[in-house]
Amino acid sequence: MLALKNLRAGYGDIEVLHGVNLEVNTGEVVALLGANAAGKTTLINCVSGLISAVEGQILFAGKDITKLPAHERASIGIIQVCEGRNLFPDMTVEENLELGAYSVRARRYLKETLDSVYQLLPILKERRKALAGSLSGGQQQMVALGRGLMSRPKILMLDEPSLGLAPVIVETVFQAIKRIAETGSTILLVEQNVVKALEIASRAYVLENGNIVMSGKASDLAKDDGLRRAYMGI
């Protein structure tokens, strides 16, 4: 579904990614792990077209999209749920969700997709008439996930979905992501909560200072002593 080949990117004269290679197969949940400032958000911003690659290729479903504008990447199914949720607080939950179906492709199936989102995330149906700004942090994250699904993504990229949430709410959010994954969705999960990410991912990459330093099956990485010491505090 997605392949990055020798990807270099950054901001101005500052290079953040130094020749990254990464793959996400159809139907997989792939975790991208790393500390703050490792380059995780830069990587998915580059995939979604919010910043440009300096060098290398981004292949999507076998096609080179390295030069494709961001809005065209969204229209072909590359959807990013940004860190911080970025909801419209004075609009209702349902209005925020409907905005996710802005593309011609997604708008055609708006009611059908909305029903599916409500089945996956029933709290959103309960709160559909509430203003998004009145919700708890966990509920707002559910709205952000649901809005991403409304775009009918071929790949859903989640940027730090557990950021700033209490531990009990983090568990709820990850259960929601697991349910989304069980529908066959392809997910690239950027996350600092290594334990939770490895529980639901099939494979993972570890990014340090703009370089992939480790990759493999999530179950194998969860047992790696170096990773456990560096990221799990074990």
Image (tube, rainbow, N blue to C red):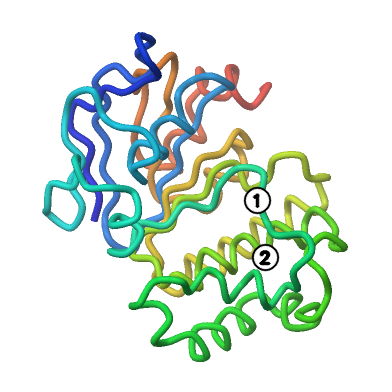
Label drawn at residue 143: 2
Horizontal side of 61 relative to 215 (left or right) equals left
Residue at 43%, 81% in the rendered image: 107
Q: Amino acid at mark 2?
A: Val
Whichever of callouts 2 and 1 sits on the residue coming sooner in the sequence is 1
Q: CA distance from mark 2 to mark 1?
A: 10 Å
Percent coordinates x, y for residue 163 in the rendering: 70, 40
Q: Crowdedness of circle 1 by 10 Å Cα count: few (<14), some, many (20+)?
A: few
Percent coordinates x, y for residue 23 in the rendering: 26, 43
User: SS class of the residue under badge 1?
Assistant: loop
Q: In the rendered image of this protein, does residue 110 appear above or below residue 33?
A: below
Residue at 56%, 22% in the rendered image: 35
- Which residue matches tag 1? 86
Q: Count the numbered circles shown.
A: 2
Looking at the image, which is closer to me, 62 or 132?
Answer: 132
Horizontal side of 174 relative to 170 (left or right) equals left
Q: Nearer the viewer, mark 2 or mark 1?
A: 1
Looking at the image, which is closer to me, 81 or 75?
Answer: 75
Label drawn at residue 99: none
| Residue that protrudes farthest toward the front in the picture | 90
Q: Amino acid at mark 1?
A: Asn
Residue at 33%, 78% in the rendered image: 105
